[in-house]
Image: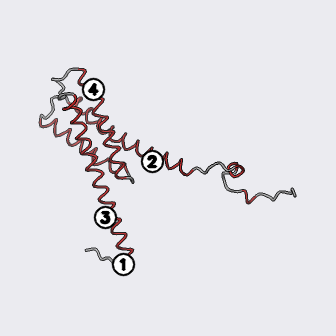
Amino acid sequence: MVQLRGTADLRRFGSLLLTLARSVAAVVIGYAVLVLLSTLAQEGWLGGVSYHGSSLQTLILASVFTPMAAVIAGFVTAMIARKRVFIHALPICLGIAVETTLLYRTGGVDGPLWFEALAGATLIGGVLLGVGAWHWYGVVTRVRRRQPPDRGAAANNPAGTAHLRAPSSRT
């Protein structure tokens, strides 16, 4: 049992619970978004996708829309998690690998191994791409916020060493 001995401990414990809840929510919601969007794309828009039963055009469209769903799911996962975003993508990627394996082994899919393995790999790549896009966006916006505005002479001295220069002899 956790013993809380003051306001600071209570705040730390609350912060830990919030972080844990955010992490679980990021993974669960990210995976749910992946399932929802990929099902919508494959079953709703394309009328069901099957290696042997679908036309080449349907397979090509599925190979575009399904990874896009994975990119969006990765972005949503990172947006909710906010910190250590690639770690939050790992359970989703593991879930994709396990699901792909189980579907192939139980006959839930009709494609050859190479096709189903590549389908799972593109989903994993899409999730990682979405997480990476969010991470890159966050890094770029943080860097832009940290750049100081141009202030004349101060802008020419980025190291902040103007106070170390010899005083000017002009009077």
Q: Secondary structure at mark 4?
A: helix
* Number of the label disc, if any, that sits on residue 61: 4
The location of residue 79, given as percent across then percent down, is 36, 49
Whether residues under marks 4 and 2 lie with C-beta atoms below 8 angstroms apart, the answer is: no
Where is mark 1, residue-wise? 6
Which quadrant of the structure image shows residue 56? top left
Q: Amino acid at mark 4?
A: Leu
Density class for disc 3 (Cα within 10 Å; few <14, some 14-19, many ≥20) is few
Crowd band around label 4 with a 10 angstrom C-alpha radius: few (<14), some (14–19), many (20+): some
Report the Cα–Cα distance between label 4 and label 3.
42 Å
State the SS at label 2: helix
Q: Earlier in the sequence, mark 1 or mark 2?
A: 1
Instruction: Identify residue type, mark 1.
Output: Gly
Dot 1: element: loop
Q: Residue at x 29, y 31 (%)?
A: 65
Q: Which residue is mark 2?
A: 138
